[in-house]
Image (cartoon, grey):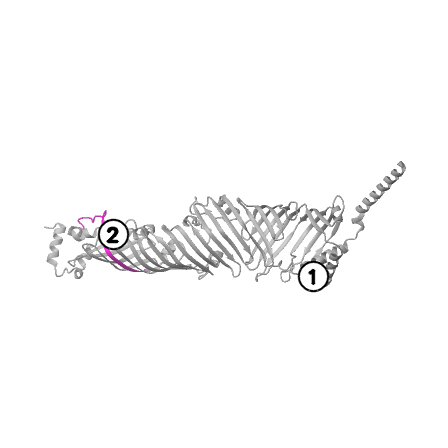
């Protein structure tokens, strides 16, 4: 009995050894050239592209595995000869025993040196769009049907994970003339079980045209079901910006779509701008200190929608939604801004250097800009806007922009206890950039507007105005130098501070300059009407009329916007017909009022000096203290 047991044990050991030796020698004994050709042919029929495998090998211990040393997937017709995909090394390892039950248990899949060449032509067609549209040949379809009838298909039970090393992805867009790349890409997937979450992590360097490589990391829990893929929770880090949220990718007969939500906690924008290669210094060093975002999004091949969204930048909050329509390209926005001060965010003036030469632009054409040429339809509400010293509230604007032409119509706002309503048109693609403003102003406090514009706050009162101006430039000095057009204004009542014209009309000694007009007081007036023409930044006031308690005043002169200076002549007409000329001149903040004695004595016809010489002479003698 013992002898028989010993013989059986020895026999079994020999069989096991021979079986193990046979399995170990199996890869060497098998010729895989035919298998390699069958795999390449099957993949070619499935994708409609040429598939080439350089070398295929098998391994048995410690795992059953397949290794591909070099494989390429051909490009689509019309996209060049560079392959769509290429991989240096692929390793697939599975458990042997589950294969007997037609269950595939993947230990790991490792892709090393993956290269993807993604392209989009000028018509918007991509070189990967037809990968799954290839129709199998009748022979392949019949073979697949026979195999399905003979035995049940293999079932993926689980996969220990996928590892991608040293991958490189390039995306060339001929329509936008741009190239984006992902280099040093590394991807890891955890244990893959259908219907259960799998850990995913990815990091790479993103390179876009004109910007340095930008590192980013992605970590998420991925769940794949028949309806699509869900990444939740999701964490994305780009430089110092960290976003949390979720992403749902759905696939249906209509195509692929994605939706989700991203929350960006407060972060400092300056390091992110530096990482993006944007060397930008704002005028105010205290801005760009903190920003945050909370937005929901939906994407499909036709459009991308960000709504609802909430963005904060320093002390400004923006809410609403933005939609990007793919074809034809159009941006739609509906935004509400609590308050906005854009001037501190403008770039700081560049220091002029003798070695630096200005960029010359051909006349009639401005430098190309993606922002100015982007088609846009937007509705904006701003609770408080502070720009160029002006403060407006409850601003409503409807903006249309296309090919560098911007139209803001209508534009309404509350302005210093009154209302502003008008339109703005700008041609940002021309050089110099041109603009046109038509506006109606009602019941606006004149002194507040003049003070904000650093002009002449000597006038106070509620003004109604109708203005039509045009010019060029986007900076305030250029706007002031180029402004041209016409305007009319009226004030039911108001005050001219800095001079008491009624006092001048009452006291003859003030006419002769023996006394100063009481500058700490002013002249109350009513029924002011004025009209003017504007030519290249100079306001020519041809008709000004107002009434005081003692006189009727007419005036004419000019105001130079660039230098903030005024040169004006007021004719103070007394009820008796006597006219006192008052010169108003000087820069803003240092306005002087002087009685023009030369004009007073020379204009004899206007004052009737020829007929009333004796009466006027007595008055002048008394005023000058002549006995």
In this orientation, does residue 624 appear? yes
Q: Nearer the viewer, mark 1 or mark 2?
A: 1
Q: Residue furthest left?
A: 627
Residue 141 covered by magenta stretch: no
Query: Which image quadrant is residue 177 in?
Result: bottom right
Of callouts 1 and 2, which one flags the residue occurring earlier in the amino acid sequence?
1
Which residues are the magenta region? Answer: 513-533
Q: Position of residue 301 (x, y in %)?
A: 56, 58
Front in this rendered view, residue 413 or 489 = 413
Q: Residues within 10 Å of mark 1 (few under 14, many from 20)?
A: some
Q: Is residue 380 left or right of residue 70?
A: left
Q: Residues within 10 Å of mark 2 (few under 14, many from 20)?
A: some
Local secondary structure at mark 1: loop
Which of the image's four quarters has the N terminus? Answer: top right
Tell me what residue is drawn at x 72 percent, y 47 percent: 94
Tell me what residue is drawn at x 81 percent, y 50 percent: 29
Local secondary structure at mark 2: strand
Q: Which mark is residue 270?
A: none
Q: Which mark is residue 136?
A: 1
Front in this rendered view, residue 126 or 311 = 311
Query: Which image quadrant is residue 8 in?
Result: top right
Q: Which mark is residue 496?
A: 2
């Amino acid at each position: 009995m013992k002898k028989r047991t010993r013989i059986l044990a020895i026999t079994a050991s020999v069989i096991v050894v021979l079986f193990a030796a046979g399995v170990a020698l199996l890869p060497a004994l098998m010729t895989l050239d035919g298998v390699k050709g069958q795999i390449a042919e099957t993949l070619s029929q499935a994708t409609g592209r040429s598939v080439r495998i350089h070398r295929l090998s098998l391994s048995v211990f410690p795992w059953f595995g397949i290794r591909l040393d070099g494989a390429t997937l051909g490009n689509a017709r019309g996209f060049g000869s560079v392959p769509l995909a290429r991989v240096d090394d692929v390793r697939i390892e599975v458990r042997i025993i589950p294969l007997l039950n037609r269950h595939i248990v993947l230990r790991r899949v490792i892709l090393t040196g993956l290269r993807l060449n993604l392209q989009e032509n000028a018509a918007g067609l991509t070189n990967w769009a037809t990968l799954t549209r290839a129709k199998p040949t009748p022979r392949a379809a019949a073979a697949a049907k026979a195999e399905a009838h003979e035995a049940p298909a293999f079932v993926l039970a689980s996969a220990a994970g996928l590892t991608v090393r040293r991958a490189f992805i390039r995306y060339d867009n001929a329509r936008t003339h741009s190239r984006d790349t992902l280099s040093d890409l590394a991807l890891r997937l955890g244990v893959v079980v259908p219907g259960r979450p799998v850990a995913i992590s990815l990091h790479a360097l993103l390179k876009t045209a004109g910007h340095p490589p930008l590192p980013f990391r992605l970590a998420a829990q991925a769940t794949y079901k028949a309806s699509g893929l869900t990444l939740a929770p999701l964490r994305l880090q780009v430089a110092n910006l960290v976003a949390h949220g979720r992403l749902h990718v759905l696939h249906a007969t209509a195509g692929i779509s994605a939706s989700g939500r991203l929350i960006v906690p407060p972060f400092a924008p300056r390091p992110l701008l530096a990482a993006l290669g944007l060397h930008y210094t704002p005028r105010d060093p205290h801005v760009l200190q903190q920003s945050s975002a909370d937005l929901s999004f939906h994407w499909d091949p036709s459009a991308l929608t960000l709504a609802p969204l909430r963005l904060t930048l320093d002390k400004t909050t923006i809410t609403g939604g933005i939609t990007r329509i793919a074809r034809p390209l159009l941006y739609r926005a509906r935004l509400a801004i609590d308050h906005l001060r854009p001037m501190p965010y403008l770039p700081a003036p560049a220091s002029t250097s003798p070695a630096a030469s200005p960029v010359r632009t051909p006349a009639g054409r401005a430098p190309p800009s993606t922002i100015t040429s982007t088609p846009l339809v937007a509705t904006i509400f701003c609770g408080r806007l502070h720009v160029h010293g002006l403060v407006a509230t409850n601003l409503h604007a409807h903006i249309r922009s296309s090919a560098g032409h911007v139209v803001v119509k209508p534009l309404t706002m509350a302005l210093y206890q009154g209302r502003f309503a008008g339109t703005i048109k700008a041609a940002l693609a021309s050089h110099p950039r041109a603009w046109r403003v038509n506006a109606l102003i009602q019941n606006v406090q004149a002194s507040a507007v003049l003070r904000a514009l650093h002009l002449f706050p000597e006038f106070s009162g509620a003004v109604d105005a109708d203005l039509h101006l045009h010019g060029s430039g986007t900076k305030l000095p250029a706007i002031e130098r180029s402004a041209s057009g016409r305007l009319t204004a009226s004030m039911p009542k108001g005050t001219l501070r800095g001079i008491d014209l009624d006092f001048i009309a009452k006291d003859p000694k003030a006419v002769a300059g023996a006394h100063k007009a009481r500058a700490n007081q002013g002249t109350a007036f009513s029924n002011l009407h004025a009209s003017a023409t504007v030519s290249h930044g100079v306001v020519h006031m041809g008709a000004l009329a107002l009434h005081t308690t003692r006189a009727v005043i007419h005036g004419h002169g000019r105001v130079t916007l660039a230098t903030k200076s005024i040169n004006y002549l007021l004719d103070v007409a007394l009820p008796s017909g006597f006219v006192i000329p008052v010169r108003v001149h000087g820069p803003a903040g240092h306005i002087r009022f002087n009685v023009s004695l030369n004009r007073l004595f020379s204009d004899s016809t206007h004052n009737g000096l020829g007929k009333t010489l004796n009466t006027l002479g007595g008055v002048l003698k008394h005023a000058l203290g002549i006995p």
